[in-house]
Image (cartoon, rainbow, N blue to C red):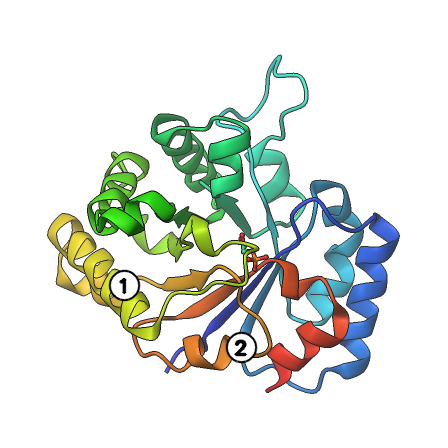
Amino acid sequence: MRKKLIVANWKMNKSVEESLEFLSGIEQNLSGLKYDLVICPPFISLFAMKAKADKLKISLGAQNCFYENSGAYTGEVSPHALADLGARYVILGHSERRNYFHENGKVINKKILKALENNLKVILCVGEDALQRHERTEIEFVINQLKECLHSVNSEDILRITIAYEPVWAIGTGKIVSSKEAQEMASKIKDFISQSYGNFLSSKISILYGGSVSKENYKEFLSLSCIDGILIGGASLDLKNFIDIITH
Ligand code: 13P
């Protein structure tokens, strides 16, 4: 059985020094990992963290990348350069990118294709906001996000994408979906992948849950057979909290 995946999205938090201190803290508290672990720090910490992360068998991921490898794109970060420095994953389609930086499905799709071309694994975030949940249109909404974002992703590449279901209303709010709601969404996502890529690939694709995951509730999500891991924001920033989650 494959290990479940725990992904820490640090968002715009921690300096390089703090990122390194955090890894040293993990090193002192870790004896064998039950989970596959990915940490996505700010870009500026990736290079400095690489050697120790390798030693601890923790993969590093970026929180975003551009859809070209090089060129006159001031302030953007190249997926080629990320892969070259040893990042294995990149988070794309996060609701904070969609909302604050106006990234739409087309842009996210271009980023996904370029990231895959550079052998990065993609953590694709999808999720409805409170209004859609209220109107009971969340499934249609999420499937539509998947259609847009996965446009022309082929069968050879689909398993290099992990789908993170992150309802926007649950991010940083302390609210979470019920197990039943998480299961329902995961099964609809699998149905969509099955229709687009066949049953075999659908059975292999990983689905994460994200949104207010904490040391109080993470076990509930990790125990669901249809959920292959968790994507943690706030609760991954505090060393003690994070160690509690990854060691139990
Ligand atoms: P929180 O865990 O802080 O709700 O953030 C979730 C998230 O956005 C992870 O990508």
**From the image, which quarter does the N terminus lie in?**
bottom left
User: Label 2: which residue?
Assistant: 35
Relative image position of residue 165 (x, y in whole percent)? 38, 56
Q: Which residue is painted at 56% across and 39% down in the image?
A: 64
Residue type at tag 1: Ala
Residue topped by disc 1: 186
Q: Is residue 38 left or right of residue 154?
A: right
The quadrant of the picture occupied by the C terminus is: bottom right
Alpha-carbon neighbours of circle 1 within 10 Å: few (<14), some, or many (≥20)?
many
Q: CA distance from mark 2 to mark 1?
A: 20 Å
Q: Residue at 30%, 73% (x, y): give it.
A: 226
The answer to whether mark 2 is within 8 Å of ligand 1 is no
Q: Secondary structure at mark 1?
A: helix
Please state the horizontal and vertical placement of residue 239, each as a whole percent of the image. 76, 70
Say whether residue 237 is visible: yes
Around disc 2, counting alpha carbons within 10 Å, would you say few (fewer than 14), some (14 to 19), or many (20 or more)?
A: some
Indicate the quadrant of ligand 1 in the picture: bottom right
Task: Tell me if residue 245 comes above or below residue 50 in the rendering.
Answer: below
Q: Which amino acid type corresponds to the residue marked 2 in the rendered image? A: Tyr
Q: x and y percent of residue 45 in the render?
A: 76, 47
